[in-house]
Amino acid sequence: MAKSRYKNRRKIINNSEIAETRPTTNIEHYTTPKLLHPTEKGKKALANVEHIWSHGDRYWKLAAHYYNDSGYWWVIAWYNLKPTEAHCKIGDSIYIPKPLNKVLKYYGY
């Protein structure tokens, strides 16, 4: 199973107006991370596997295939600057960065 990407994230309490419409007064959530992307030099140190997006593709399926763990779907989304599958069109080139341990260093693992 993928290491939790929330491990080093700060939690905040949101007690704004949205909480007034729910049966709670506070909503706890994680802060948005600031993800650095590899530099050109860093990208050259990685092996990018090109995948052509096709009908039925999902990030979790690609992660399961290339990383043997579907929990790393977010690595592929982050690396390609396409946060959801809805940002991908059939025929798009998606790059799977490898090896995973080097890629995770950019994320702070």
Image (tube, rainbow, N blue to C red):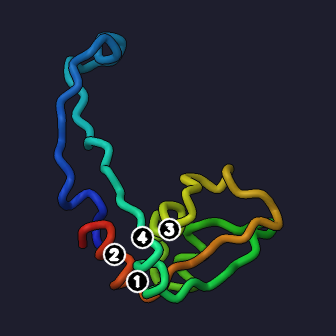
Question: Given the image, on which type of amino acid does mark 4 rest?
Answer: Thr
Q: Are marks 3 and 2 in contact (CB under 8 Å)?
A: no
Q: Residue at x 36, y 12 (%)?
A: 21
- Describe residue 23's horizontal placement relative to residue 39 as left or right: left
Q: Which residue is mark 1?
A: 100
Taking the spot 43% from the left edge, 87% from the top edge, the residue there is 45
Q: Are marks 4 and 3 in contact (CB under 8 Å)?
A: no
Crowd tier of the residue under label 1, counting other residues whose Cα lies within 10 Å: few below 14, some 14–19, many 20 or above? some
Check the picture and name the quadrant holding the N terminus.
bottom left
**What kind of residue is marked 3?**
Trp
Tell me where residue 7 appears, x and y as whole percent.
Answer: 20, 61
Q: Nearer the viewer, residue 85 or 41?
A: 41
Q: Residue at x 61, y 85 (%)?
A: 49
Are discs 2 and 1 less than 8 Å apart at CB? Answer: yes
Could you tell which of marks 4 and 3 lies nearer the N-terminus?
Answer: 4
> Dot 4 corresponds to which residue?
39
Between disc 4 and disc 1, whose residue precedes? 4
Q: Which residue is mark 3?
A: 73
Q: CA distance from mark 4 to mark 3?
A: 21 Å
Question: Label 4 vs label 1: CA separation?
Answer: 16 Å
Give the number of the mark in front: 4 or 2: 4
Q: Position of residue 86 (x, y in %)?
A: 68, 50
SS class, disc 1: helix
Answer left or right for 26 relative to 54.
left
Q: Nearer the viewer, residue 14 or 104?
A: 104
Q: Which circle, 4 or 1, is nearer the viewer? A: 4
Q: Position of residue 80 (x, y in %)?
A: 57, 64
Mark 1 and mark 3: span between their CA atoms? 12 Å
Q: Which mark is residue 104?
A: 2
Q: Nearer the viewer, mark 3 or mark 2?
A: 2
